[in-house]
Image (cartoon, helix red, strand yellow):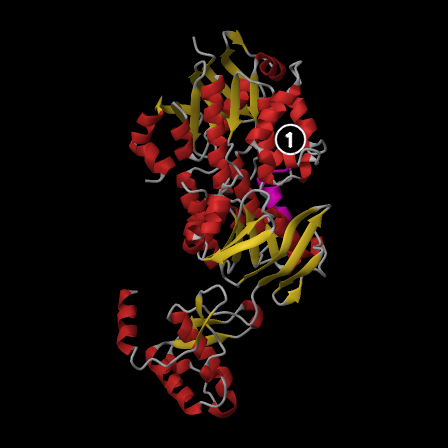
């Protein structure tokens, strides 16, 4: 049984149908990438998983139906949204603490882990999140998600706004989390090269439908995927 | 093109000597303080003039400083009847510039369009910009790159007057920009887009772009901007529900509708896949040509920077660490270490 199962999920924004029956699976400890053009429904797919968009069809996590965003968070799904969504008025540290809101635990160890991944955040620990640079806020959003010790991490374009060096580091961090701690990852990413290099499987969406799915290697060998996403 | 190159090769023996100087950054450019720009070398000047009349169809010279110096196509016969005595230096200057342009020299106006001069900006104890200087010449596409937190967006915010620097000057078209209020910046001809999209939520695409046009009455109608950027069919959609990459296009159209001379683009490739980034590169180049624009872009997508930018400035920890062509900065060890990483 897959950790996450989507079956014929549909979603719309007003008159615009963003998902027209998407089915996808993320296995336990799996690392899955979602590729697609701007407007293909990638972000909406993640929103459907975390329950942050109205949808029909079935979303199951660890066998249970996911109904609300709160339910998704408590079940162990952490969603790093597009545009980050950090709390601008709160400090870096307060943002991180909120990430662990669903758990009762000693946070120091988790915080140390996050600061290990992103030393910049430690330097800026007491700074208001709104005063961080764009890329630093992206790091904070990811750090906050890690504080929840999620079973499944949903990432919406983690490379957005980040320097190439940091993008590389972030994906190395994700692979490490996935391998060492078994955190399942579902990542939407435009940097297809790095996404396919990190993920074991991938889906390609087009206008709200899955048009290609398979192992990352197969996708990399796929002519149209190469032309549209990899550029060679 | 090949034909012209061939012809110019043939003529190279008789080609007048034009001054070249090496800029501080090493880029070689044509310049206006060449030997013939003075009055002393009249005979040579007259020879150049004849050479020009023979080689090229030249007519219209636009010496309006604020629009940059340009030469348009025309016929030799339409050359103004120059009185060589008093008109010589000025006329030759024009011709020299035309010649340089035809031979891929850069034709520069008297001052850069944008000058950021020794700007320092502090936030409490953090020095976001530390004595940063860079220029953007009219008609150029310039990239501004650097690690996260290097000060790129702060530089944009200083230029658009959201921040007042603690030290230094910013000049636009030779005039002090720091005397302009933030709300006046767009009327000076500077428009921008935002890293994380700052559209008016709850309004439609059309309404958002109308705000841009309203800010500065210009030559471009809202419709032009919408269709040029390729979002004409979305005009009545609310911006909130649009995909991120499309929202970035709306911002671009909004900026364009204000008829700017300089556009600051903060990560225009965000949310776009490889193919879409290539389309964007073409769009930016067309924009520059069709709307007589100058573009300064912050971008992490090195593919886009490589394909559109003519020059790149690199910031790290608030300081400028490099400047040059995209190829030069990509090969610069300091840039690789601070920004690109070895695998990039």
Which secondary structure class fits the magenta region best?
Answer: helix
In front: B284, or B320? Answer: B320
From the top left corner, tell me how far across and down residue A145 is, in percent: 58, 24
From the top left corner, tell me how far across and down residue B335 is, in percent: 48, 49
Q: In this view, does A61 lie to the left or right of B160?
A: left
Q: Is residue A118 left or right of residue A214?
A: right
Q: In which quarter of the image is the N terminus of chain A?
A: top left
In front: B253, or B38? Answer: B38
Magenta-highlighted residues: B201-211
In front: A111, or B280? Answer: A111
Q: Mark 1 points at which residue?
A: A86
Q: Is residue B204 magenta?
A: yes
Q: Quadrant of residue A198?
A: top left
Q: Does the magenta stretch include residue A98?
A: no
Tell me if I can see residue B76 in this picture: yes
Q: Is residue A134 left or right of residue A209?
A: right
Neighbour tally class for label 1: few under 14, some 14-19, many 20 plus, Cα within 10 Å? many
Q: Which residue is drawn at 64% across and 14% down?
A: A103
Tell me if I can see residue B234 in this picture: no
Q: Residue at x 43, y 43 (%)?
A: B277
Callout 1: residue from which chain? A
Q: Is residue A92 above or below residue B5?
A: above
From the top left corner, tell me how far across and down residue A195 is, in percent: 42, 30
Q: Is residue A200 above or below residue A127?
A: above
From the top left corner, tell me how far across and down residue B17 is, in percent: 38, 80
């Amino acid at each position: 049984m897959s950790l996450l199962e989507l079956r014929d999920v549909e979603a719309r924004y007003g008159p615009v149908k963003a998902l027209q029956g998407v089915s996808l699976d993320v296995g336990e400890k799996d690392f899955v990438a979602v590729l697609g053009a701007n407007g293909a429904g990638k972000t909406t797919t993640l929103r459907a998983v975390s329950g942050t968009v109205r949808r029909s069809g079935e979303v199951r996590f660890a066998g249970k139906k996911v109904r609300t965003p709160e339910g998704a968070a408590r079940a162990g799904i952490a969603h790093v949204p597009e545009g980050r969504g950090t709390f601008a008025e709160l400090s870096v540290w307060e943002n991180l603490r909120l990430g662990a809101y669903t758990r009762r635990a000693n946070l120091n160890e988790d915080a140390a882990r996050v600061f290990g991944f992103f030393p910049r955040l430690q330097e800026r620990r007491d700074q208001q999140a709104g005063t961080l640079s764009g890329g630093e806020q992206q790091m904070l959003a990811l750090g906050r998600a890690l504080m929840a010790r999620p079973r499944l991490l949903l990432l919406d374009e983690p490379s957005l706004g980040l320097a190439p060096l940091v993008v590389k580091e972030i994906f190395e961090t994700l692979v490490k989390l996935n391998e060492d701690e078994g955190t399942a990852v579902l990542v939407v990413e435009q940097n297809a090269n790095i996404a396919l290099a990190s993920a074991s499987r991938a889906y390609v969406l087009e206008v709200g439908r899955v048009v290609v799915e398979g192992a990352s290697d197969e996708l990399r060998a796929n002519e149209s995927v190469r032309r549209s996403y990899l550029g060679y | 093109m090949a034909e012209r190159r061939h012809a110019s090769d043939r003529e190279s023996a008789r080609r007048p000597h034009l001054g070249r100087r090496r800029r501080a950054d090493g880029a070689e450019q044509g310049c206006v303080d060449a030997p013939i720009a003075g009055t002393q070398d009249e005979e040579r000047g007259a020879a150049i003039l004849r050479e020009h009349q023979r080689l090229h169809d030249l007519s219209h010279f636009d010496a309006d400083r604020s629009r940059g110096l340009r030469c348009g196509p025309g016929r030799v016969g339409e050359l103004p009847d120059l009185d060589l005595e008093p008109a010589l230096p000025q006329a030759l200057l024009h011709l020299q510039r035309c010649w340089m342009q035809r031979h891929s020299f850069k034709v520069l106006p008297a001052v850069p369009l944008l000058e950021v001069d020794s700007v320092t900006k502090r936030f409490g104890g953090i020095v976001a910009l530390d004595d940063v200087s860079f220029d953007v010449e009219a008609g150029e596409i310039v990239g501004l790159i650097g690690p996260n937190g290097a000060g790129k967006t702060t530089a944009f915010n200083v230029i658009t007057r959201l921040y007042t620097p603690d030290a230094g000057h910013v000049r636009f078209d030779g005039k002090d920009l720091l005397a302009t209020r933030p709300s006046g910046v767009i009327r000076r001809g500077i428009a921008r887009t935002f890293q994380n999209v700052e559209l008016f939520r709850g309004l439609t695409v059309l309404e958002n772009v109308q705000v841009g046009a309203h800010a500065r009455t210009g030559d471009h109608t809202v419709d032009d901007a919408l269709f040029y950027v390729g979002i004409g069919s979305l005009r009545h959609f609310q911006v909130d529900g649009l995909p991120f990459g499309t929202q970035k296009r709306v911002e671009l159209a909004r900026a364009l509708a204000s008829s700017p001379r300089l556009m600051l683009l903060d990560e225009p490739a965000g949310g776009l896949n490889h193919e879409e980034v290539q389309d964007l590169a073409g769009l930016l180049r067309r924009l520059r040509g069709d709307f007589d624009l100058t573009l300064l872009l912050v971008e992490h997508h090195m593919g886009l920077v490589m394909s559109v930018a003519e020059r790149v400035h690199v910031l790290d920890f608030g300081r400028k660490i490099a400047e040059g062509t995209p190829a030069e900065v990509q090969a610069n060890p300091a840039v690789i270490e601070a920004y690109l990483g070895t695998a990039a």
